[in-house]
Amino acid sequence: MALAHAILAALVEAPCSGYDLAKRFDGSVGFFWSASHQQIYRELSKLEDQEWISSETILQAGRPDKRLYSVTDLGQQHLKEWIAQPCEPTPIKDDLLVKIFAGHIVSNKIILAELEHHQKAHLEKLSTYRDLEQHYFNDLQELPEAAKFQYLTLLNGITYETNWLAWCNQAMELLNQTVEKL
Amino acid sequence: MALAHAILAALVEAPCSGYDLAKRFDGSVGFFWSASHQQIYRELSKLEDQEWISSETILQAGRPDKRLYSVTDLGQQHLKEWIAQPCEPTPIKDDLLVKIFAGHIVSNKIILAELEHHQKAHLEKLSTYRDLEQHYFNDLQELPEAAKFQYLTLLNGITYETNWLAWCNQAMELLNQTVEKL
DNA sequence: CATAGCATGTAAGGAGTTACATGATTTT
DNA sequence: AAAATCATGTAACTCCTTACATGCTATG
């Protein structure tokens, strides 16, 4: 049910269309949730049936109409209740780590290439996150309450990517040591 | 399909029963994949149908029989091919971060309590991981090749938990600052 | 004698992925 | 003229979670 709540959280911050949600889930909301547009449209229909959100059709000149969704009072109530219920840390499921765990059955080259690939990806993400930080959260004390919470999710993204980068470096070092020994 | 590969990776390291796999996925294998016993039994049946694994029934005195699964040559071949195919970093989906993002709609107390709860959980995991590190990977240079790869997954778990702890502290500090201001 | 551990499953339903489908406008 | 962007969906399938189900043994 967490996708529903992630959508509610995003719509509470700013009402928008399914299309815009998909973009946000691919960008700024992406450091705490990811979802495809198919999932989002399906979930939006469900949420509207339950009256947790409501929509308004916006006519646009030279573009398709869009449906602007907002969270209803009922929806906000449910979101609050969900937030108040304690939850457990998300269990890890990570393809790369599976590959590393069984890394000894393939050549070191393959593993090193994959590590480099991931290092690059994490570096790119970190860089966009740092840009977001400078742009939107430069003087944090001046921003409204809500922004502080959103900054914390960005900060999590930053430390997360930094952490992966550090680990990639350690992993590559350890494997290179091994290569030299051969 | 990654659960299948996670199971193969675990069975390559050490053949075992479904029951044992479930325990391992809850423990040492848990820092890169998690799965319930229901999932595991279903996946084991599929893998055996495909002949990626084979089983042998072990009769036990005073205990139920168990089926010991091992990876076949065909299975290992598939695992190798899967490892060689590049993959992307796992997208984040995290309930706590959704809660934080919408944290301004509930009282600070609720958020702080949840942060403390998570801090505690991460501290416990870190502690078990550190114990594993000391027990099994104390003299890394003396261990066989395969152990180095497994150590890297443990190291990832350690940095992951350390990272969450650091973030929890930062988050609680920021929120406490806000409380003082009121 | 009750609880925890060993050992393996089925069934139903919810969540997520992949592929298909349409059609207008704006940019290169 | 082609590609990208805007905008919204359906269908089929796989994956994952929750609940149900059984039965024996060892430990406290």
Image (tube, coloured by chain):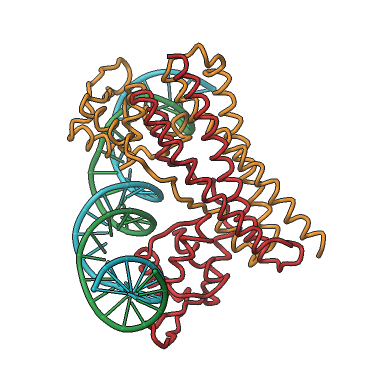
Chain colours: A red, B orange, C green, D cyan
Identify the image quadrant of residue A109. Answer: top left
- Of all residues shown, which one is farthest toward the right? B181
Image quadrant holding the C terminus of chain B, namely bottom right
Q: Which of these two is toward me, B83 or B42?
A: B83
- Of all residues shown, which one is farthest toward the top? B142
Point out residue A27 in the picture as x, y percentages from the top left corner: 50, 61
Q: Which of these two is toward me, A133 or B149?
A: A133
Q: Residue at x 22, y 30 (%)?
A: B52
Left or right, B88 with respect to C7, comes to right
Q: Residue at x 36, y 29 (%)?
A: B21
Image quadrant holding the N terminus of chain B, namely top left
Left or right, D27 with respect to A105, comes to right
A85 above or below B150? below
Left or right, D25 with respect to A75, comes to left
Q: Which of these two is toward me, A51 or B28?
A: B28
B39 above or below C26? above
